[in-house]
Image (cartoon, rainbow, N blue to C red):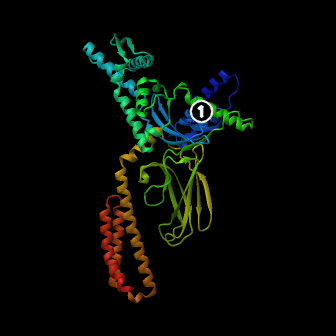
Amino acid sequence: MHLVHLKSLAESYLGTTVKDVVITVPPYFNDSQRQATKVAAHLAGLDVLQIIDKPVAAAIAYGLHMTTTETNVLIFDLDDVAFNVSIVTADEKGKLTVKATGGDTHFGGQEIVDIMVDHIVKEFNKKHQMVMDITGNSRTLRRLKDSIQWAMQDLISNTETTISIDSLYNAIDFSTSITRVKFEDITNSFFSKCIETLASFLRDAKIYNTNVDHIVLVGVFTRIPKVQQLLREFFNVNELLKSINVIEVVAHGAAIHAANLIHKKREKAKTLPIVSLLQTATLSIGVDAHDGVFSVIIPRNTPIPTTGEKIYFTTVDNQRSIPFNVYQGERSRAKDNKWLGEFEVAVSPAPKGKSKVTVAFSIDADGTLNCKVKELTTGLKKEFIINHNKEKISHEVIKKMVKDAEKYKMEDQEYIKLMHARNVLKEYIYNVQRRMKMIGSIDKTRLHAKEIKKMETAIEAANEYIDKNQELADVDEYKKVQDQLEKLCVDVIAQLV
């Protein structure tokens, strides 16, 4: 419905039918969200030339795709509900790459409004010696927020303004004057968080302030003078790229890119420079093959389109298939990430570790995730698209997943150590059983019933411990069980060789 409305507006303004479009999306959109956008466009009667990230479109708007030297561009995007920062790199040939994305999708310009609402309520209560309860009065809250937003817009070009509301609460009028300095003091926590988030993003992206060549402003709240002042101070620059309306800059860049693609599509003279784009994977994508550990195939922030591939082996004797669960996220434990789908690959029965398959993931320019698997013994191949439309990841969830990965980093490292110790113990048990079987098949008389029973009991106890303590045990306990088993097994097997 939204796209139908936009299509109608464009056709009314241009006086012609609109069919071909470039659609911009936030950089954290996953392949499912991008596919849903394509479907919505199709239903709206539009042909999608390409889906591109908002930061790339903003860079195009300022002609940064026409650079002849390598350039790092920071896209500072602050709108009502989200704060996104991205680094877009342009190389000598004008190819644009989204090198890294970050920010806080739970934090936006509405935070300033909420801070001002709290301030006004306190001022009203103090002035009239009463408790103003607006939590249950949506009309009063809406009128208050509208007045605050109008005042904020006025303070962009003026140093003082007035917030005046008739019959704000219990038929009491309210009016107060506010200077730009006072506004900035009241909302100082918001501006501080913006800069803290920006600094954290640059550290994670391993980019120094001095490596940023241009800062592009996107979003209505970047018009606030204090935001611009802090950015100039943070990067020690005099100028920010804001000559194009910050609300329209993304659409401006998308229009330029659409013109390029249409020229190319119609094979006409290329009067505009062709834009080469390279975007990045928002979250890591991989599988849980058998032990609960997240095996990453395509790491986060990998430039797309891209392909990643890994080899996986059977884990038990005569295994006939290997099941794979596909996940997206940043946690070491597979189940702590977002489940995308599952598939199973048939393999030739063979001793453990002999049969193997390659799993290759590829992400195309629009962010669609494809999978190819190959059973290496038979050479049989299988290809499909991972379908996970049942529950799409919102940008809030993506941000939370990245935050959780950092928050639980130590816990995840302990989990990796735990699973490694567990797998080492299982592998040792398997090798002991195979060794005993080989010796027994050669000369059964050399195996004494008492020794056999002792070994079998110890192995059974170790296996039982593994089954009952998959997530409760710690690394030292697994090592203790293995040490005890090794002492017994080494003594017995040593007598037989």
Q: Quadrant of residue 61?
A: top right
Residue 217: where, in percent of width, then height? 49, 29
| Residue located at (50% from left, 46% from top) | 301
Q: Determine the secondary structure under disc 1.
A: loop
* Farthest-out residue, bottom: 445
Q: Residue furthest left?
A: 129
Res 1 seen here: no
Quarter holding the N terminus?
Answer: top right
Front one among 191 and 365 = 191
**Residue 479 spot, x, y in % from top left:** 32, 67
Quarter of the image holding residue 375? bottom right
> Given the image, on which type of amino acid does mark 1 rest?
Gly
Q: Is residue 186 above or below residue 354?
A: above
**Count of labels in the image:** 1
Residue 458 is at least partly visible in this image = yes
Give the x, y percent position of residue 235.
Answer: 43, 34
State the image coordinates of residue 419 (x, y, percent, origin top left): 38, 61
Q: Residues within 10 Å of mark 1 (few under 14, many from 20)?
A: some
Q: Nearer the viewer, residue 49 or 288?
A: 49
Q: Is residue 137 above or below residue 250?
A: above
Front in this rendered view, residue 191 or 480: 191
Q: Quadrant of residue 485?
A: bottom left
Quadrant, the C terminus? bottom left
Query: From the viewer's perspective, is 266 left or right of 470?
Result: right
Q: Say above or below: 492 vs 152.
A: below
At x 40%, y 43%, the residue is 403
Q: Which residue is mark 1?
A: 63
| 188 is higher (above) or lower (below) than 374 | above
**Residue shown at 53%/46% (left/top)?**
388
